[in-house]
Amino acid sequence: FGAKADLRAVARVSGALLPAFLLGTVGTVIGSLVGFGAIALFNIQGEEAVSDMAKVLAALAAKNIGGGINFVAVCDALKISPATAAAALTIDNVMALLYFPLCDVLGRRFNRRMDPVSDSNSLPNSMESAESVPKNDAVLETDLEAHLEAADNKIDAG
């Protein structure tokens, strides 16, 4: 402890990832606040349940921003029971099983609309020629065999 972080160095090294991370952080905080507002609005279970749910929301927000160890630390700090923490992680994982495939499907649809070339065998815009892209597994296998043979020759010569 007592270590100091050079935030300017972090910003310089992280490049374009820092704004994306900050956007995700803001979205997580806003989503958590909206979620808490919805829980408080539909206070069906009583005040104690709303308090527990608010603690779980805080722990899940910490997990989404900083990773699983943050979830554990916030659960410990807020005295969330192990059973409640396990239930929260279970629900979070089930929702992730729905969320990530949905993002994949939506991303593919969005990408098709943005890409004027609809041929699935076409090259990405960043590629200059078809020769730079292997066409099938046989080409990849031959290329791999050539690299392995060259590596074996270097080992034998070295």
Image (tube, rainbow, N blue to C red):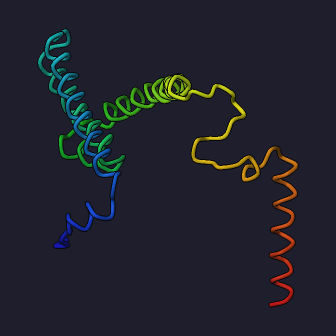
In this rendering, the count of numbered labels is 0
Residue at image location 88% in from the left, 49% down from the top: 138
Q: Residue furthest bottom?
A: 158
Pick whichever, 133 or 102, lies toward us: 133
Residue at image location 63% in from the left, 48% down from the top: 127
Q: Is residue 32 visible?
A: yes
Residue at image location 14% in from the left, 12% down from the top: 41
Q: Quadrant of residue 3?
A: bottom left
In the image, is 55 to the left or to the right of 68?
left
User: Which quadrant: the N terminus?
Assistant: bottom left
Residue 65, relative to residue 110: is it above or below? below
In the image, is 125 to the left or to the right of 82?
right
Pick whichever, 127 or 7, lies toward us: 127
In the image, is 133 to the left or to the right of 40?
right
Percent across and percent down for residue 30 are: 20, 30
User: Which quadrant: the C terminus?
Assistant: bottom right
Percent across and percent down for residue 36 are: 18, 23
Residue 103, relative to residue 66: is it above or below? above
Percent across and percent down for residue 39 are: 19, 17
Residue at image location 69% in from the left, 27% down from the top: 119
Q: Residue furthest front?
A: 128
Percent across and percent down for residue 50 are: 16, 21
Pick whichever, 100 or 125, lies toward us: 125
Residue 70, relative to residue 45: is it above or below? below
Q: Residue furthest left?
A: 47
Q: Is residue 97 visible?
A: no
